[in-house]
Amino acid sequence: MKVSRRPVVSPTSWRIVLSPKVLFVLLVLLVGACGGNSNGAPTITTGPGAESAEAAVEELRSLLIAGDFASASALAVPKQAALASLAEGATFSQVARALEGSDAQVAANFWSGFAQGVGDTFPPGAAVEATGTRTESGVEFFLVGVTSGSGVERLVVTQDIDGHRVDLFASFASGFAGRLISPIEILLTSLTEDALLILSEMKATVPSLLVASSDESLTPEAVQEILQLIELITRVG
């Protein structure tokens, strides 16, 4: 089954690019996300997701526009922000510590970086509408179309995990899959506990990546990067 969108959107508009300042904050929070908060910053606690896929996208749009990234952290599938941070230069140790604890602070900073281009993803007046579901490897995904006034439709995907949460890998993999390939290749050559933990958690993203790779609006190059990442991850026994 293919996930199709009527108008074709350039995948470059979906790339998640964090500034050096945001990346520095992300790495600091990765270290403190699962232990005590030595710098005195408030701890972010992830609550339940939204009541529906549409509601998750609507809530996310409102929170990002308001700059409430702490609340937005609840609207990301758990652990995916920590895994995606490998694409931004986080060390294996930092990612492993976030995976072992809570990655709510990491998710908040993912959305902080994402919000720099929020107008491209959620243009003013865009219509949000559920467009169906898809099951991949036993995981159910909920598809939501975000359509601008000009008719350009973007796809955002959620999972129902104690409420609907946005699946970062299914929705935005074309923006960071290529930058995850090198870290995963290095992890595959390591036998450390951190490497094994990260690779184990990465296997859970394969169904999401399969959904992302079926997006017919992506360029062949973007699809190939996603498929290459899937091939690497599935080497894990």
Image: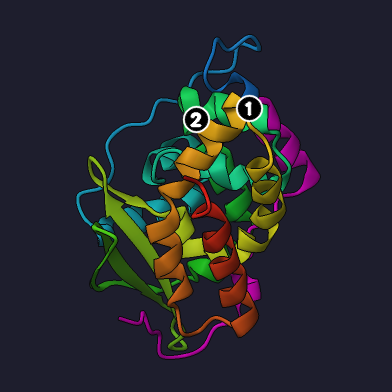
Q: How is the image coloured?
A: rainbow
* Amino acid carrying mark 2 in the image: Leu
Asked if the stretch drawn in magenta spans residue 161, the answer is no
Nearer to me, 178 or 39: 178
Q: Which residue is mark 2?
A: 99
Q: x and y percent of residue 9 in the render? A: 55, 83
In which quadrant is the N terminus drawn?
bottom left
Describe residue 182's horizontal placement relative to residue 14 as left or right: right
Q: Confirm whether residue 6 shows in the render.
A: yes
Q: x and y percent of residue 126 in the render? A: 41, 74
Residue drawn at (26%, 44%), measured in percent from left and top?
161
Asked if the stretch drawn in magenta spans residue 27, the answer is yes
Q: Which residue is mark 1?
A: 192
Could you tell me how many numbered marks the image carries? 2
218 in relation to 188, above or below: below
Q: x and y percent of residue 150 in the render? A: 47, 88
Q: Confirm whether residue 29 shows in the render.
A: no
Residue drawn at (41%, 72%), measured in percent from left and top?
155
Residue drawn at (53%, 41%), measured in percent from left and top?
199
Q: Which residues make up the magenta segment?
A: 1-28
Dot 1 lies on which element? loop
Is disc 1 surrounded by few (<14), some (14 to 19) or many (20+) residues within 10 Å? few
